[in-house]
Structures are given as structure tokens and as C-alpha cells.
Amino acid sequence: MFSSMVVAVLGLFCFSLETKSSPLGPPLLYGPDVALDGHVVEFGCRVLHPPGEPLLLQLFRQGLRSRALAFYTSLDGSAAVFPMVVRRASHEGTLECVASVQNDSQIQPSVSPPHRLKVLVPVGGATLAIRSREEELFEGERLLLSCNVTSGNYVSYSWLLDDQPLPGPAPQPGPAPHHTHQDLLIPRAGAQHSGSYVCVASNRYNDTEVYRAASPKVTITVRELASRPALSYAVEKQNQTFSARVTCRSSRGTPPITFSLLGGAVLLARQTSQQGPSASFSVPLVPDAPPRGLRCRAQSGGRVADGTETAVHVAPVGGPVTLSSEYITAEDFSVTAVTFFCRVAKGSHARFQWFLNGSLLRPDAPAFYTLLQPSARQSVLLLPVDRRSSGTYHCRVSDLYDNTTGVQSGKLYLDREELNRLSSAVVAVVFSCFGLVIACVSACCCAGLICRRRLEHLKPTWTSEVKGVVLAFEEDLDWEEYRERAEGLTAAGLESDLEALGAEEEEEEEEEEEEEEEEEQRPENRETKRRTRSDEEENTER
């Protein structure tokens, strides 16, 4: 940028030196800015203040004064017209007009300001070249395409993939109305970049005419790398000989892919697949032998992908087959659905078959039941409890590779009315519990009645005894002292004091009874007592 500024300053300086001493003044050059190669255009040049003498007007490319592109002699100071056939090699660049007086060499020539001319060559002969590799490459590799033209300048490029435009970078800002994308670079190609590529070269003249050239199609194939292969196997039996048909399969990858089967670190077999991302191998097996670890390896485009190890073994079906059930109840405790479980004691590749009333229940037929196999030794039958599901169920287990022999389970009967009906045992337990509760309540009532009668029988006896004691000894009691103590105890309301008082009275009564017995034993006391009683009777009669 600094060098261009220096060139511009020097050009202005030279222009000022050439016109400083010239009385003509700088001429004016005018004409088109863009011209088609091989077409005729006209440029004009005039001196604003002619001296009145014949003028020589010449057209040059800037910096090439040795060869004039056109010239014109003006006798009366009129403007010069330069018709010419434009050629890119001769006319493209910066033009200038030089005016000089023919009959007076003392007058210095004058130079017009520069005029920029762009000569456009219509584009043609577009071709597409692959600069990265061949037409086939693996994903992740670089793809570089180049669009070349045999003719044309100021060319813009666009790219098509399967007749659909590819997005390109935005045009660069500036006065030039074009931008160039001659090369198409994809740093890491993927499967989505496979297809037919076409480059379209174009240039534009005065925004009115557009010239285009399309290249022939070039087909690019981006091959997918093989993913980690998964291993699956199926057991085969022929004449009491067992083998495993092992399949190595990648979820993605473009053939050819080389698959290898390894047992640990030992290579067992290798195969190159040309049709798809899978390969099959046959491996001999021994029944009931320990599992054997196998894994697959896929190789494509120089990349190796190893799969996970899988245990391969075979165990024929054997042992008892058990059939059990579970019930699903609603809020009202009614049975709405039932689940049957069929389990076999032994077998690595078991085939389960369910039967209703002797008819096979097919897993692929639309029906009211659902068949599941959560493990190799168990199968589940789900069904609702209704009229369709009533009947006798059993299951049969056999080997997938040999259906000639099998083991059958016991039978279970399913009926909606029977499931929702209370059993006799439940009814007996309920009524027994109810009778036991009634018996306990009756026993408690009887015990309460007996205790109440005893209390009522003891109360009159105690009352008569108390009255007899009072009548016998009321004369010896100190009633004032007894009344004061009773009132004090009643006011205090203490049960303990009452009990103590009762105990003291009992002791006093016992002592008095002993004294009475002693007095009765004495004759004089008996006579005195008898007299006292006769006196009391006489007083009473009176």
C-alpha cells in the first residue's frame, strides 16, 4: 500500500511538471470504463482552452509513450475522437491523452488525468480438476477441487453438488464487482460430500450481460469408515455336531471391508466383504463346555475398529420346567390380569411355546395376550382375566436349533369366576374368627354378672354384722370422739385415713370381743349381765 502511494505521488509530481509551463492546460480524456475484448469503442479528448493553433492529441497507455494507441489533429481546437478495436493485451490498464501544439515546439505538451479501462474477456472452457487424491477417498480425508477456464478474466466461481448450489464465502468489499473462488477445499470430507460436482465460471459486463461456462460433472465418492463391529451368533446342529454361525456386522461403512474373527489374541478367520458391512464365520462348539470369548475386527481405509468380546457357548435344554403365576387385582380386590412364568432349569438357546387348551399361542398373531422372553431361561405370558383367557395353560421348552425334543411343564387352570370367588378355607377362617370374638364377649359378660351378684350378696351380710356390733357395744363407744374423727376424715377426703381408721376399729372390736368372752366365762359377770337385761326389759315395758 505504501508503494502505491509513492507511485501516485510521483505521477502527480511529473504531471505538474509537464503542465506547469504549458499554457494549454490539462486536456480532458473521456470514454467507457469497461469494454469487451475485440469490440470497437470510442474515446474523446479535448482541450478546454485551445490556443487557436493546430493541436495534436494522442492516446497512450500510461508509461508507454513510445507507441500511441490513437492520434487526432485538431485545426480549430475541436475535441478528438479515437475509435478503435479494443484488445486486452494492448488497451487494458490506465490511459492518458497528451495534447501538443504542432507548429510551436516551445510550448510544452499537456497531459490529461489518468483514465482506467477494464477489458473483459468472456469466460469459456471451464474444466474441473481433482487436486487432493483420486475420485474415491475415505471420510476424514481432505478434498480439494480446482476449476480452470481456457478464457476469461474477472471470473466468479460457484459450485454445484448433485445440481444443488454449495454455499460459498461472501464477496470481498471494494470497487471490483467480482470475487474469485477457484478452489473448493473440504478439510474433512464426510459421506454427505459424495456426489457429482460441477463448477460454474461467470463474468459480467456492465451488469447487463453475464457470461457463464460450466464444467463437466466429476463424481466424488467419500467412503465411510467401518464402525465398531457387533458380534452375534446362532447355534447349528448337524448329525450331533454343534457349530456357531458367527456374524460380524458394522452399523456403517462402505465396502470393501475386511472383517477378522479373533479368539483372544488368536486370529481364527478373515474375510473381505464386497456387498455390505457384514461377514459370517463358522466356529465349532462343544455342548456344555465353558463359554469361549470371541470378538470381531473391521478394517477399511487404513483404520482398524475392534468390537467387544462376546461369550459363545451352547447348553441343550434340560431339567424340570416350572410354571407359576401372579395375579393383578383392582381396588375392589377383584383379579383383573394374570402373569404366567415359564422357567427351565438348563438351556442356552431355549425356545418357549405356550398352549391354551392344547392350542399353540403364536407370538406374531394379533391376540389378547402378550409374550415376552426377558432371559434365555424364562418366558412370560401376560393376559387379562376374561372369557377369552379362560382355560388350561402349559408351556413347552425346546432348543432353537433342534425342535424334535422338548420338555413340557405342568398345567394351570384359569377361570374368572373361580379367581374372584372366596374359597371355603377363607370363609371358614372368617366365621371362626367371628365366633371366637362372640365367645370372648359372652364370657366377659357372664363374668361381670357373677361378680356383681357376689358383691350384692356380701353387702347385706356386712351391714348386719356392723349393726350387731354397734348394738352390742354402742354403750361402750365414745360417740363424741368418733363423730369428731369421722367429720375430720370426711372433710379431708383422704382414703388412706379412712382405711387406717377402719383398721383401728377392727382392732378395737377384736379386743372388745375377747373381753366379752372372758367376762362371759365368769359366773358373776353372767349374772350381772342377765340382771341388766331384765332391768332393761322392765324399763321398756314401763
Image (spheres, helix red, strand yellow):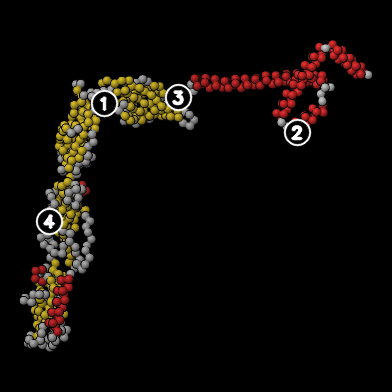
Foreground residue, 51 or 327?
A: 327
Tag shown at residue 127: 4
Residue at mark 1 to residue at mark 2: CA–CA distance:
100 Å
Q: Dot 4 lies on which element? A: strand
Tell me which residue sits at (82%, 26%) in the image. 479
- Return the x and y of residue 447 as percentages of the image width and height: 65, 20
State the residue position of label 1.
400
Image quarter of residue 441: top right
> Can residue 211 be seen?
no
Whether label 1 touches label 3, CB < 8 Å: no
Instruction: Tell us which disc is closer to us: 4 or 2.
Output: 2
Q: Amino acid at mark 3?
A: Leu
Instruction: Tell us which disc is closer to us: 3 or 2.
Output: 2
Residue at mark 4 to residue at mark 3: CA–CA distance:
84 Å
State the residue position of label 2.
491
Q: Amino acid at mark 4?
A: Thr
Q: Please, is residue 76 above or below residue 378 in the view? A: below
Image quarter of residue 253: top left
Precedes in sequence: disc 4 or disc 2: 4
Q: Dot 3 lies on which element? A: helix
Precedes in sequence: disc 1 or disc 2: 1
Whether label 3 touches label 2, CB < 8 Å: no
Q: Amino acid at mark 1?
A: Leu
